[in-house]
Amino acid sequence: METGCLEVVVSRRTSTLVKVIRFGAIILTVCFCFLTFLVHFLMLLPAAGCAVLAYLAWLESVVDYEYVYVDKEIRIAKIQQKQRRKELSAYDLNKMEIFAPIGSSHLDSVKGRDLNVLDYSSGDDSSKPARYALVMEDGTELILDMIGEYGPQIVDIMYMYYPRKVFKN
């Protein structure tokens, strides 16, 4: 059966820390620029550093995660400010150990293990019913939100190929 390419885009909630760092760095940049005129021209160095920090915080303030299902593989990308796309990783589902909703009793078998948790979810509690954990054989646990039009379709296709590893509810 040909499944093609299915895509889910999840908007990440902006962290309060990123907002504080962004506005704090902007204020420090302005202050160091004024100090350049009053004290010494070398105050431009910390001003430039704060400007770079403000730019990096600005990039992290709007983040979307994109999950693409292609040929028994999930590819995850990070989209910053709706303009910069960075491919993060690709996971072969043949090496999947378990895929189940967060809080499911099926995840009890991996509860005590020391897993490398990578959270690619929205971070918002309103999408909890569609939040899944994908545990790989190498000890990596992915937190994914299967929302939107194609999220449930991806879960159904994964269940069709791996009925003993994928749990819907």
Image (cartoon, rainbow, N blue to C red):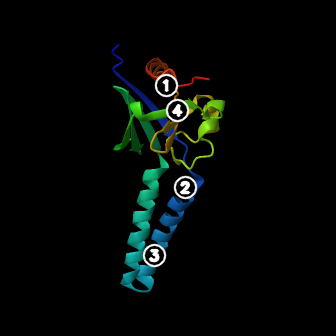
Residue 152 screen position, x and y as percent = 51, 21
In the rendered image, which residue does mark 1 sit on? Answer: 151
Which of the 4 image quadrants contains residue 64?
A: top left
Specify the farthest residue to the top. Answer: 1
Task: Check disc 4: other Cα within 10 Å, few if <14, some if 14-19, many if 20+.
Answer: many
Q: What number is the disc on residue 32?
A: 3
Asked if the residue at tag 3 contacts the one at tag 2, i.e. Cβ–Cβ closer than 8 Å, the answer is: no
Above or below: residue 128 compared with residue 20: above
Dividing the image into 4 quarters, which one contains the C terminus? Answer: top right
Q: Mark 1 and mark 2: span between their CA atoms?
A: 30 Å
- Drawn side of residue 1 relative to residue 146, left or right: left
Q: Mark 4 and mark 2: span between their CA atoms?
A: 36 Å
Above or below: residue 150 compared with residue 34: above
**Of circles 1 and 2, which is in front?**
1
Say what secondary structure mark 2 lies in.
helix
Q: Earlier in the sequence, mark 1 or mark 4?
A: 4
For the residue marked with disc 2, what is the amino acid? Lys
In the rendered image, which residue does mark 2 sit on? Answer: 19
Residue 71 screen position, x and y as percent = 33, 25
Task: Look at 52% across and 27% down and name the residue there.
Answer: 147
Task: Look at 38% across and 77% down and name the residue there.
Answer: 44
- Drawn side of residue 111 relative to residue 62, left or right: right
For the residue marked with disc 4, what is the amino acid? Ile
